[in-house]
Structures are given as structure tokens and as C-alpha cells.
Image: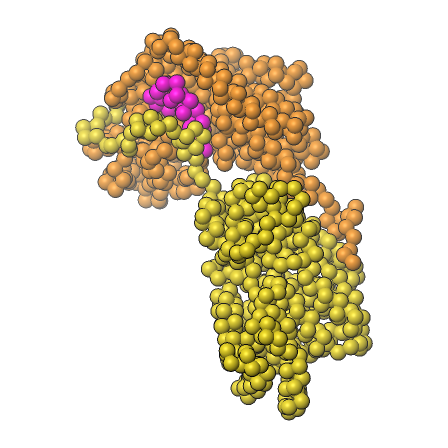
Chain colours: A orange, B yellow
Amino acid sequence: MGTPKVSDVFQEAACGHNQSKSEKDRKKGCTKVATPGAAAGGCAFDGAKIALQPIVDAAHLVHGPIACEGNSWDNRSALSSGPRIYRTGFTTDMNEMDVVYGGEKHLFKAIRQIIERFNPPAVFLYQTCVPAIIGDDIEAVAKAATLKFGRPVIPVNAPGFVGGKNLGNKLAGEALLDYVIGTMEPEITTPTDLNIIGEYNLSGELWQVKPLLDRLGIRISACISGDARYREVASSHRARAAMLVCSKAMINIARKMEERYGIPWFEGSFYGISDMSASLRKIAALLVSRGAPEDLASRTEALIAQEEKEAWASISGLRPALAGKRALLITGGVKSWSVVSALMEAGLVVVGTSVKKSTAEDKERITELMGEDAHMIDTLTPREMYRMLKDAEADILMAGGRSQFVALKAKVPFLDVNQERRFAFAGYKGMVTLVSEIHRALTNPIFQTLREPAPWTAGCRITPLV
Amino acid sequence: MDGTTGSLTGEREPAQDYVSVNPLKMSAPLGGALFFLGIERALPVFHGSQGCTSFALVLLGRHFKESIPLQTTAMSEVTTILGGGENIQAAILRILEKSSPGVIGLCSTALTETKGEDIAGEVALFRKKHPEHAAIPVVGVSTPDFRGSHEDGFRAAMVRTIEELVPEGGKRVKGQINVLAGSHLTVADLDYLRGVLTQFGLDPIFLPDLSRSLDGFVPDSFEPLSMGGTTLSEIRRMGQSSHTLVLGESLRRAGEVLFEKCGVPYVVVSRLTGVGAFDRFLVTLRDLSGGDYPEILKRERSRLTDAMLDAHFYLGGLRVAVGLEPDHLFDVGHFLLENGMDLVARVTTTASPLLPKMPGGKAVVGDLGRLETEARDRGAQLLLTHSHGRQAAERLGIPLFRLGFPIFDRLGAAHRLSIGYRGAMETLFRLANLIWSRDPENRPDTWYPKLRKEKLQESGEPVLEEGFVPVRFDG
């Protein structure tokens, strides 16, 4: 079962967040235990699926009753440049008989059917709570199926009840480390091979970055896992350097690949113009230190100069309309300080930002940016959020989709910046999109209209037609 | 540059178009026919060649998916030259013999107007010759095709009907209210309005009432007449109403005639769509009726505000090119602006005092060709006009939102609700869904178009290999 793995990923040596905790706190684990009656986030299975499903040519089979896949499939905007099988919802849809007699045979037959009918290069197998509690051994099934069908079948042991989404991300990383990475050799290698870890290509954000790397001659050997092919991930251990994107979700992959294969890595972000540039510089520097051509650094500088110029030119036109507007930023996945800096560059005033998933270092950077009286919000209940917006403490709320309806009921413009969003906000182009979307939201006249009193409300000044 | 084309800039009017490319407007007699189709047991007759009638009949049929009673005086080359009086007499007589219409609406056409036919004179002559048919009203309307659009023909028929059929004066009936319903209002719109007015305690007479004739009702027997609509007795009671609601600036003259003839005061309501417009309409109704705001409308307003919020993500800043009749354009245009869209092109069919006051700037009288050009020049993202806009939308590569008349390539046009809180909500959903359904999925080259060299290097789909390295299972 997953228990040793769970404590293993909690002891993440490279995680600053984890290492800064006291011994006692560290034992409690990274993910807070969900509070009965006050939990909102996703489970470990959700997190594991999120992390691996962007491997687009693989089949993703969920072993469990219908809720786990039936209620959640095709709910994210991780995009593919080719194969579509990753968006097909596969589940064993366990029934009562499976629960009574065990679901392993059912699962094995499901794998056989997927291979026969869809012929994917690999099948990822997700454990869920019910088969975990009745003792279905998915590792054993995966092993048997792999041998029988001559096709990799990868067990992902992250049943929902072991913890939250972040833990699931990490357990998915463990599955890759244990069963996938290093099992194939790349067809070619170059001195500029780069792994990008923790980027899921939501709304195509990878493609706001990849063309720039292409122009610099940097080859993404594997993106784990956005728009990835199984083969790329399996052979990613030959890369020269790695970048860890977006918080600590897959830090175990970065660290263990360094341990096992000597791939140096850094943590960076593609959100915000200055962060994007910093990330490009670090990528170039790391690759040069590993044998890439010396001129990569200077070519990177030239590209950064060009892209920054274009981005600022696009943003500056919108600056007058945005100057002084107050934004409240409540986000989980997106690095707060990085977006804060981009918003401030566009002339907005950030009146508050969430720091729920930020490290002490992140918080320092926010203080640096926003000043000593920076309003850092750990948790904000929907009711409190509604009050802040209703009392006009902010002109726009930027948050995850779940907060959308709170903002809209308060008749305040809203911009979705979380995973389910419609727009891609990465890199230079993404930041221009972000600012123009803020502009579009703030300039929409409906908010003024909606604040006008209805005919039957006190204060209505509408006169009859004559 | 708004309102001008090509090299013409500044305050000057656009260059005159000598060719109409893909017409936007329909003819005036068609509008006249549409009006009469909303009167019970009416039979519209075109005084013209049979083709005039046939085209209108086919187009009305394609829009409503109903059999359309429409007759013709079937003018030939000879009768046109010698005078069509006899054809009118013969047509009316034959109609009266074959079926028993409640009213005959006789619309002139370009052909007979050019010749200088005197419709009123011919009708008077018929009356003298055939006193036995005196009980059947015949309303003659001048609707030359060469003047105005179907909105104008619709008004002309309404004005003439009021002049002919509404008697002067009479005792005021409290709560009775006339509703002069514009040609752009659908069956669903009229039903909705009737509900709203009734809830305010008002007793409306709709003129015309297409919601009782072209609503798809399946009767037990068939007659080649409009089977439903405003009754003659209702029309004759219109002079006793306490007020008239004129729904559309184009119908102002009809309201005036009713006022001059019967002293019924009128209010012109030029907007019914969207929260601001309908708020004002309801305040007006409360003022006229003294009734309370119905609870259901309070609920509907709240639903609309929520719909506006949900839809604005898709519609905010959307660049829309609109081609509609003036009254319709005015109402819809304000609604689009209210919801954060930009009206980048405004093309309409006929002269109207609304033209300089159009939301988003002055509207031009023009054709779909012009709408297409302006839409292209100004980067429109949505085309909003009737079904004939489909070719332009295809060429422009943008979606078409079908509105107005005719809508011949979709079902249910007559049953689409557009007005009021609920109609606005439904329209917003349809608009947003149309945009959403075309939301392109981002691609690897969405933000940085591929260089030619990169394209060449691009490899195909990864292929499955035989002898695949198996997954690692340790122990």
C-alpha cells in the first residue's frame, strides 16, 4: 500500500517549505489533514490524475466505482498537440460483485480491452479508495498485465483518502520515478536537452514558452507532463538540466532525478514578464554549465530583450485604463508573487494576495514587492470574500473558478486564473493576455448597469416613457 | 471612419452605392402582407403581377413554416397597360366567392404604382358596383416596392387599417390598452408582452397579433385565410382604449392617427430588450396601470442579471456587425452595448429618425454587401442579421447570429423570445454559446507562428514500437 510512499514524499529534502518546519510539524505531513465539515479541495487521486493525464498518448484507467472517473473526466484544459486518447475516460466502474469478490480480474480484463481496442503505448492505472480498502493489489495486476501484453502498465497508488491534491501530485511523481523514467533510451540526445517538470500545458501554456526555447535551440526532452508522450517521459533521464515549474507539486521528481541521473535543476516560473526572463536566463546558464554552446547566454539575452519590448509595447497601451485599479488575488496553483509583480508592472494595485501555498521565501518576496503592509491572506472564506467585494475593497477579483460565483454575486469583475481557466497566461504572450483580460473585465459596462436599483427598489430614479 | 467607406473620411456621407450587393431589406408589400396576416380571417392581396405575390409568399412560408394565405390580382402585360381596375374587381369577387374573409388587405406593388393605379378609387368603385359585399372591409394600402422596406409597408398597412376600421370616439374603457406591435416582434415576444400587461391588470388589444395566427397552431379545418389574429371587433374597440403603446419608432404615425381620430394618447416604446430598457418599460406600465410589479418579473430580472454576469466572459468586448430593420437595430443595438459588446458596423434598410441616434454611432442604409465589407474592415467577430447573412459570415469566417426576418434555414424563429428580462437572458445564453462553441483550442503555433524551417523539422505522430522496453517492476 501507499503508506511508506506517503511518509517518504513528506520528507522531501529539497523542499524549503518542508525543511523550515519543526520536526513535529514535519511529521504531520505536507498536506493538512482535511477538516470534516470544512474541506473544499480535491483528493490524492485527483492530484495524481492531474499530474499524469497530460501524458497524451497514454490511456488513463481509473480502478474504482463510477464517482472517481464518471464525475471528473475531461474536466481540465491540458492540451495535446496530437493524440487524444488521454481525454478518453476509462474506468472499471466497480459494482457490488467487484467489491465483494475483489476487482483485480475485472481490472485485468479492462486493461486487456483498452490495449486491444485503443492500442496505447502505455496504460496508467489509478488506484482509488474502494479497491484500496478491499485490498485490490494494483501493482500486482499492473505487473501481470505488463508481462502478458508486453506493454507498460503503470500503477499509480494514490487513493483519495491518503490525502489532498498536492500529495497526489507527489505520489504520481513517485509512480513515474519507480516505473517510467529511465525505462527507455532517447533516440537522440543534444547538449541542450531540458526537462520541464510540473508544467501541465493548461490551455496550451507550454506553447507560450516552447517556441522561444525552439528559437534558442533548446530541446525539451520531456515536459512532465504537459503535452508529453510516454516515450519522452520514459527517456527523460538523459536530459542535461531541468526546470521545476509551479510550486512544490513535483519537487520529488526533480530531486530524485538529480540524485539518480545527475540532472541539475532549478525552480522557476513562467508567470510574469520578469519571471519568464529570469527562467530563460537560468535555463541557459544551467545548460551552458552542462556543455551547451557558450553563445546560448547571449542569444537568450537578445531574445529576452526582443520579447520584453514587444510585451511592454502591448501592455503599455492598456496601462492608463488600469492604473490605480485594485486587484484582489486569491490563487492556489499560480505563484502569487510572480503574478503580483506582473500586475504591478501593469499599473494595478494589489490589495491582497493569498499565501496559502507560499513558502516563507515567497512571503518575503511579496513583502518586498507590496511593502510592509501587504495584505497576505491565508484562507478567505467565501463569505468574507463576498463582504470584501461588496464593500468595494477591490475592483477585480482574480481567483480560481470556484470563487467566480462569489465575485459575480457581489457584481465585481472576476478573472479566472486557476487550472480550469479559458485563457493561457504563461510567458510574455500570456502576460499580455492576462492584462488585456483584466482590462476587458474592468471595462465591461454591465457592472455599472447591475448596480443600478431595480424599478421596485428604493432609490430607483427611472422615469416613465411619455 | 464610422459610417464611411474607403477613401471617404470625415463628415461626408458615404459614396452612393449603385448596386445593391446581397440585399438586406425585403419589400414594402411583404411588410403589408405580414401585417394583415395578424388579423383574423384576413386575406392579403397584392395588386401586381403574380411573381410579386409568389416571392413574398414563398419567403414568408420559409420563415414561418406555415401555409401563407396571399392572393394576387395577377396583372399581365396587357392589363398593366390598359389598367388593372378590372383585375382588382375580379380578384375581390373571386375571393369573396371562394372563401369568406373577414377583411381583405389590398397592397399595391411597384408595377401598379408605376402605372399610376388608383387603389382607393378602385375599391370605391367596387363598393358601388357590389353593395351586396359592403359588410366585408377592403383596406387598400399604397406599398410600392420602390419605396422603403418591409418595416415601412407594415406601418402603411397599420395606418390604413386604423383609418378604415377604427371608428371615432366612444366611451373610454379603463384598463384597455392598444399595443401596436412592430414587425420585428415574434410570436414569443407577443405572448410574453401579453403576460406582462395582464399581470399589471391591463387588457391589451394587439394590432396585429401574429401570436394568434402564425404561431403554428394546427386547426381542425383548413381555410385559405389567416386563421387567428386580431379580430375585427377588437379593432373596432381600439378607439375606446385608455392608452396606446407604440412598439417601435416606425409605427409612431399609426399611434398619431389613432390619437387624432379617437383621442387615445400614445407612448412610443422603442426598446424592450435588456435590463435597462425593460426597467423603463415596466416603470411606464406601472405608471399607466397603477398596478404592482409582478413577483415573477422581479425574479426574472434577477435571473437576467446573473445571466449577464455569466455571459460577459464570452461577450465582453466582442466586435459585432449588425444588419437589421431600423426599429430592431435600435433595440438590439442598445442591448448589445449594455452587455459590453461593440457595434462596429450598423447597416439598416430604410430611412428612420432613429438612424442618427443608433447605439454605437449612426447607422447607414445599405445592403449585406456593405455590412460584409464593414465587418471585414473593422475586424468584426460576430455577424448579427437574418439568414441571408450566412454567405457573408462564411466568407468572413465568423459566426452568424440569426435575427430579424427572414430566418429560413433554422426552425423556430417565430418562437424565439428576445424581449423583456427573459428574452434578454435567453438571447445572452444563445450569443455566448455561439461564441463559446467557436472558442478555438490553442495550438502549438497559436502564439508564435512556425518558421518554415521548423515546419519542415516537425515529426509526425510517435509510432508504437515492437519490443517496447517494459515497465520496471523491482521485486
> Residue A220 colored magenta?
yes
Magenta segment boundaries in residue numbering:
A203-223
Q: Would you say residue A300 is visible in this rendering?
A: yes
The answer to whether B244 appears left or right of A347 in the picture is right
Furthest residue toward front: B81
Q: Would you say residue A28 is visible in this rendering?
A: no
- Please say if B397 is above or below A258: below
Position of residue B50 measured from the top left corner of the image (x, y, whole percent): 50, 75
Furthest residue toward left: B467
- Please say if B306 is above or below B216: above
Q: Quadrant of the C terminus of chain A?
A: bottom right
| Total marks placed | 0
Q: Residue at x 61, y 54 (%)?
A: B365
Position of residue A156 measured from the top left corner of the image (x, y, whole percent): 35, 29
Position of residue A51 measured from the top left corner of the image (x, y, whole percent): 40, 28
Q: Residue at x 35, y 11 (%)?
A: A292
> Residue A181 colored magenta?
no
Q: Quadrant of the N terminus of chain A?
A: top left
Position of residue B289 measured from the top left corner of the image (x, y, whole percent): 77, 63
Q: Residue at x 73, y 73 (%)?
A: B238
- Please say if A118 is above or below A365: below
- Please say if A270 is above or below A71: above
Depth check: give the residue in front, A10 or A428: A428
Q: Residue at x 57, y 31 (%)?
A: A436
